[in-house]
Amino acid sequence: MHVRLSQGLSVSEDGKLIEHSRCGCGAAFTKVFDADGGEPDPPTGP
């Protein structure tokens, strides 16, 4: 089981909001949100 701890937010060159998080085991995750208010892209990572 992964516990996602927020590592911050950033904005991509094409205007999408990117949420960065990590687990205590070292796994990294990103979640991308479209700035137009659409559905988020599926998270990446293990």
Image: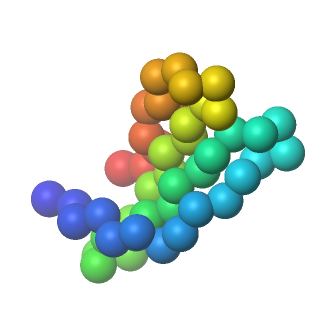
Question: Where is 12 relative to 7, above or below?
Answer: above
Residue 43, by quadrant, is top left
Please give the name of the residue rendered at 33% of the width and 71% of the height, measured from the top-left corner. Answer: 5
Q: How many marks?
A: 0
Quadrant including the N terminus: bottom left
Please give the name of the residue rendered at 49% of the width and 45% of the height, measured from the top-left corner. Answer: 31
In this view, which residue lies farthest toward the bottom?
24
Residue 33, by quadrant, is top right
In this view, which residue lies farthest toward the left?
1
Q: Tell whether 41 sits left or right of 36.
A: left
Residue 2 visible in the picture: yes
Q: In this figure, which colouring scheme has been used for the structure?
A: rainbow
In this view, which residue lies farthest toward the front?
37
Q: Tell whether 45 sits left or right of 3.
A: right
Q: Tell whether 17 sits left or right of 3.
A: right
Question: Where is 9 relative to 35, above or below?
Answer: below
Between 33 and 41, the one lying in front of the other is 33
Please give the name of the residue rendered at 82% of the width and 37% of the height, measured from the top-left corner. Answer: 14
> Residue 16 appears at what percent x and percent y?
69, 39
> Residue 19 appears at what percent x and percent y?
52, 55
> Residue 13 appears at what percent x and percent y?
85, 45
> Residue 20 appears at what percent x and percent y?
51, 61
Between 43 and 15, the one lying in front of the other is 15
Question: Where is 44 relative to 36, above or below?
Answer: below
Please give the name of the residue rendered at 65% of the width and 33% of the height, measured from the top-left corner. Answer: 35
In this view, which residue lies farthest toward the top?
38
Q: Tell whether 5 sits left or right of 10.
A: left
Residue 28 visible in the picture: no
